Structures are given as structure tokens and as C-alpha cells.
Image (spheres, rainbow, N blue to C red):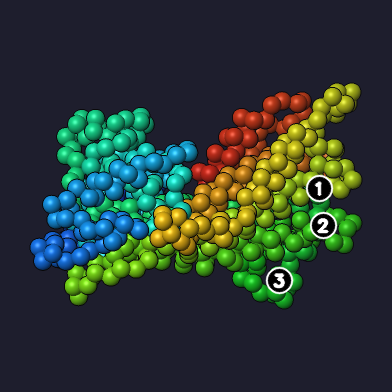
Amino acid sequence: MTQATQANKTQSIIHFGNKTLSLEDVVAIAKGAKAELNSSNEYQKYIQQGADFIDNLLSEEGVIYGVTTGYGDSCTVKVGLDLVDELPLHLTRFHGCGLGNTLSEMQARAVMACRLSSLAYGKSGVSYGLLKRIELLLNLNIIPVIPEEGSVGASGDLTPLSYLAAVLVGEREVIYQGVKQSTIDVYTKLDITPLTLRPKEGLALMNGTAVMTALACLAFDRAQYMAKLSSRITAMASLTLKGNSNHFDDILFAAKPHPGQNQIATWIREDLNHHEHPRNSDRLQDRYSIRCAPHVIGVLQDSLPFMRQFIETELNSANDNPIIDAEGEHVLHGGHFYGGHIAFAMDALKNAVANIADLIDRQMALVMDPKFNNGLPANLSGSTGPRSVINHGFKAVQIGVSAWTAEALKQTMPASVFSRSTECHNQDKVSMGTIAARDCLRVLQLTEQVAAAALLAMSQGIRLRIQNDELCAQSFTPSLAKTLTQVQNNFSLLTEDRPLEQTLRQTVDKIQRGEWEVCHSCAQ
């Protein structure tokens, strides 16, 4: 982890409106960091001139999509000036049809951060007061209840974002102090006056890519951690199998210089004390799930930079329609709500992550099977003597790993290729970016479950080797030893069969909170 990333993760205040945001900034907001909007007079004037330009156009009876016209295919329907002020409220209300599970509080906070970032870019024609209200909700931790289903990713995330817009005007529900409550009840308790949306503000709030971008930021953060964790698990698997650490030699990887792949190989090599203990096995070549692990995990590691660029460019953009250029006095109608870059990044990311689930699944299969695990007991059972016949170790856990992996692999069908025409063929080519991001989060969940099982299993295998005097704990690198200690503090050696569900759940939770040691001796 870089120093910049560490700083962002621990930063307590994230600034909007005067700098480029990183995806780590969004993750920090999601985890509870405060938001601070640029309060300089110059910036307030810059934002406000967009709203004033809209007012001036209305006074001159100008035609503006979504302000003096209906929405989408109804853009040919003229809205009289006497109804312009009501139109934004109607937009928020007729899109109140989301279904499915609701976004977590973390996810909803990330959505608010992404919408604030886009509107703070200053090309959406909204008032400074609207931005301040989103800042206030974040800092009071008043979180909209947002159903996750209902967006095709163009015109952006209309239906889920309507729940943010509705909360701003005092409608629907929020989570406040951990309890789902009526928005207006919370506002009444806190003496908050609901907003009255200005002519373009409903459209500006809803017509954009904030939901898919927010989920992409969170997915990227988890995938980046998974690359490191799966490298550590591979080193543990190699030790469990008494593998050949020459497979990760620096001279070998210099011959195929993908930088991410080489980084993974370096992490594994350093974890294995390669130059001190190059070979523990009689096998000249380990099986692919060990030998080729840097090549599998390296695909994810090498793809992260371009995915970061896609996500952070979207995050730091005006992505609604129309774009308001108040300085040049232009209203520009286009398609910046289209989430194609996020869709592609999420389709790619879920593929790379699912391949890691498959890799770890194969490593698990090797360590469980006496035909392949180089002398360990079947299913890594720690039971000995007469009772060994009734104890089954990790047998069922490995079945679970197979099931979770299969489901992860099934989810890798790219969502972006399932564009479908909707809304009277106005939205006749859509991104499916939000569905792709949700798919990616599901793949991450399943892969984290696979990784949790592997952490327990590989720790068991290494402890069995130590008991048999086949490994010496003093020879482990400090980073790998710390992981083993962390696991052992939460998981006693499995000798007698016992339910492992709660231990697995706790291990997954720690993965998702980033609590398992993943720093390597070569990474500061």
C-alpha cells in the first residue's frame, strides 16, 4: 500500500469542489469520513452561476430539456412555465419504483459522495445550497434507503438516485442512528427544512452514474486487497504442499515482465524465504494452481491501473444531461450519463476476481487430497488414533468452496453486452453498468468466502507440518508469521469435527474490513 493510499484511508475529512477525488476518498466517505465542500466565495459564485443561468433562460422562455420539456422520449412535450417548478418533484416521484435488496449504509454513503463529486464539478446547473445539503446529510449520517434494482445504466442511475433526491425534499425513508425512519420525521427531530428543488436540480441529481461509480469504487478497493491476500494464501498453500519456491524466482519472472505479475511473484517469493529454502518437494514442477498463481493473480494486479483510471475519471466528471456551461452560456445536450466505462471495468474486474476464486479452489483441492498433498491426512483432519475414522476435517468446507467458486464463475457473463432498448426506444442502447457493478460485488463476496476457507485450511496444513517436524515456524517471514498468528488466534486446530460457519463468517468479515495481514516484506 502506498503512503498516499494510507493517508487517504485514515483521512477524517474529504474535500469536495477544490480537488480531484480518488476512489480511496469515496471509500473513506463510505466508512464514515466527513465531507467538506469548498466554501470560498469564488467557488460558491462559480456553482451558483449555473443555477442563475437556468433562471435567466427561463425568464427569456428558452427551451431546456428536462426543465421546459418532459423527460426521455417525452422531450417533445412542452412544459409551461407555470408547471416548471413542479416538474423536478414529479421526476423524483415517478422513479420511486426500485425493488430488490437495499444498498448497505456504506454503499449508500458512497453513492452520496459520487453524486456530490459530480455536481461539485459545476456543470449541472444546481445551486450551492443543494451541494451543502448533501454535505449535511453525509456529516449527520442521514442515509437514504436505496433499492439496488431498477437501473439500466442510461440515462444513468435514475431510479436508485431518485431515492437520494426524494430524501432531499423530505420524502421516503432514511437510516439514521442505525434505524430505518421516515425522512420527514428525522428532519422534524433535527429541525431540517426539506429542500424545494430548482428547475434542473431533480434531473441533475438523478441523471448520472453515481450508483455504479460508487459500487465500482468499493469493488476496486476490495479487489486490490484480494490480490494481496490471495498471494499470501498461495504462499501458505505452497508451504502446506511442501512446494518448490523456485517457481517464483526473480530471474524467471524477469523473462516475462508484466509488472503486476512480477509484483505478485515477488510477494510470494518473499513470503517463502525463497533463497533460504528453495525446495521442499521431490517434484520438479508443482501443479499449475501453485506454479502459475502469479500469472492468474497478476492479471488482476496488472488490470487495476486502467480500472482506476476509468473509475476515477467517471468520479471526477459531470455525467448528467444537459451540461450547463454558464460561463459560455451554452446548454449542451448529450449522453454523459452513459456508464460504459464503469460497465467495462466491472465486467473485467469480476472476471479477474472469479479466476482467483477458481485458483484458490484448485489449491484447496490439492491440499485436501492425500494423492496430491505430499503426506498430509485426508481433508486436513487433525484427528489421530481410533477417533480419526469419524472425523472429517475440512471435507464439507471444501464442498462449500467448490459451490462458491462455481457461483462466482457463473456470474462472470458480461452485463454490458445485454443492453436492451427501453423507454419508448429513447434509451435504445444502455450500459448496464450498475448491474455489472452489482455482479462484481457478488463475485467479490463469493471469492472472499473462498479465501476465508483457504486461510483456515492452509493454516491447519502448516500447523500439521510443524507438528510433524516438516516445517520450522522460526523460518517463516515476519509477514507470513503474522498472518498465521492472526488465524491461529481465531481458529484452534481442527481435531474433532465442529461447525465452522461462525468462524468462516468472522473470517470473511475480517477480510472485508481489511484486517488480515497482507503487507509483504517488499512492500512498505
Mark carried by residue 287? 2
Q: Residue at x 88, y 58 (%)?
A: 283
Query: Would residue 169 be found to the left or right of residue 479 on screen?
Result: left
Q: Residue at x 76, y 53 (%)?
A: 238
Q: Residues within 10 Å of mark 2 (few under 14, many from 20)?
A: some
- Looking at the image, is mark 3 or mark 2 earlier in the sequence? 3
The type of residue carrying mark 2 is Arg
Q: Is residue 230 in view from this perspective?
A: no
State the image coordinates of residue 409 (x, y, percent, origin top left). 67, 51
State the image coordinates of residue 383 (x, y, percent, origin top left). 82, 29
- Tag 1–tag 3 contact (CB < 8 Å): no
State the image coordinates of residue 416 (x, y, percent, origin top left). 54, 59
Q: Residue at x 89, y 23 (%)?
A: 386
- In the image, residue 82 sits, relative to residue 183, either above or below, namely below
Query: Would residue 53 be found to the left or right of residue 284 on screen?
Result: left
Mark carried by residue 87? none
In three-dimensional space, the C-alpha distance between marks 2 and 1, rounded to whole angstroms, equals 9 Å
Query: Would residue 523 be found to the left or right of residue 384 on screen?
Result: left
Mark carried by residue 253? 3
In three-dimensional space, the C-alpha distance between marks 1 and 3, rounded to whole angstroms, equals 24 Å
Mark carried by residue 366? 1
- In the image, residue 481 sits, relative to residue 264, either above or below, namely above
- Tag 2–tag 1 contact (CB < 8 Å): yes
